[in-house]
Amino acid sequence: MKFFIDTADVDEIKEAASLGILDGVTTNPSLIAKTGRKHKETIQEICALVDGPVSVEVTSEDFEGMMKEAREFVTWADNVIIKVPLTADGLKACKALSTDGIGVNVTLCFSANQALLAAKAGATYISPFVGRLDDIGRDGMDLIADIVQMYSNYPDIDTQVLVASVRSPDHVHKSALLGAHVATIPFGIINKMFKHPLTDIGIEKFLADWAKVPK
């Protein structure tokens, strides 16, 4: 399973990369706004920090506007891929971009039918939002299971399932068990994933015993 980090904070990306686990980055307008920095310079710095794909999201709602933004974004770095919303115009842009060999992450997916449409339109990644489904009383992992199963039925589908809106380490755990290709994980959740109280207790015991060893 690939691990992306869901952030536009350069310091978080540097720290995640230092762990040796980072395969890519996802950003969105909200994450960019939190940095208080200019969009282009932030994306270019992120792209220089990672070898994997960096998702850059369009903000236009119409096909022509999406395509104009996408054409600009892909000039910023070789590892930029375009993130589009799962709308009719978003799917049109996905088809046009993917036909031209540009990677596309179709975002804001909340149903299996939407995921099928994105795959047909040539999406590189489909991003189902599990946390937001949990928020309305649905089990987001059920959607991941459905999409993984449906895609596996058709060997010609190359679209990868990118689990988004991750709210806990359990979301990552369950996504891996279900066979999702990627999880995009907030920095705080990455930090929680390698922590366990028994690990801490074990380290404390080893250090206490080591202190007793004659020097």
Image: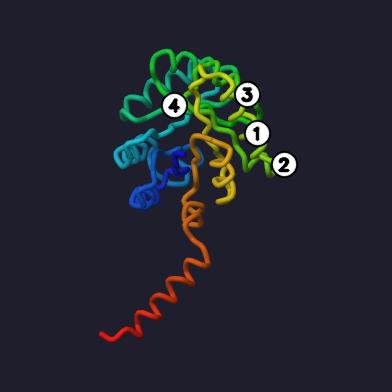
Q: Residue 99 placed where, x, y %?
A: 43, 13
Identify the residue at horizontal 31%, vertical 40% (top origin).
45
Residue contact at pointers 1 and 4, CB within 8 angstroms:
no
Secondary element at image label 1 = helix
Residue 136 bears which disc, if any?
2
Q: Disc 2 or 1, which lies upstream in sequence?
A: 2
Q: Disc 2 or 4, which lies upstream in sequence?
A: 4
Q: Residue 163 placed where, x, y %?
A: 55, 37
Report which residue position mark 4 lands on.
82
Report which residue position mark 3 lands on.
114
Q: Mark 2: give few (<14), some (14-19) or many (20+) Cα within 10 Å.
A: few
- Residue type at mark 3: give it: Gln
Secondary element at image label 4 = strand
Report which residue position mark 1 lands on.
143
As drawn, is 122 to the left or to the right of 16?
A: right
Q: Residue 72 placed where, x, y %?
A: 37, 23
Q: Mark 4: give few (<14), some (14-19) or many (20+) Cα within 10 Å.
A: many
Q: Disc 1 or 4, which lies upstream in sequence?
A: 4
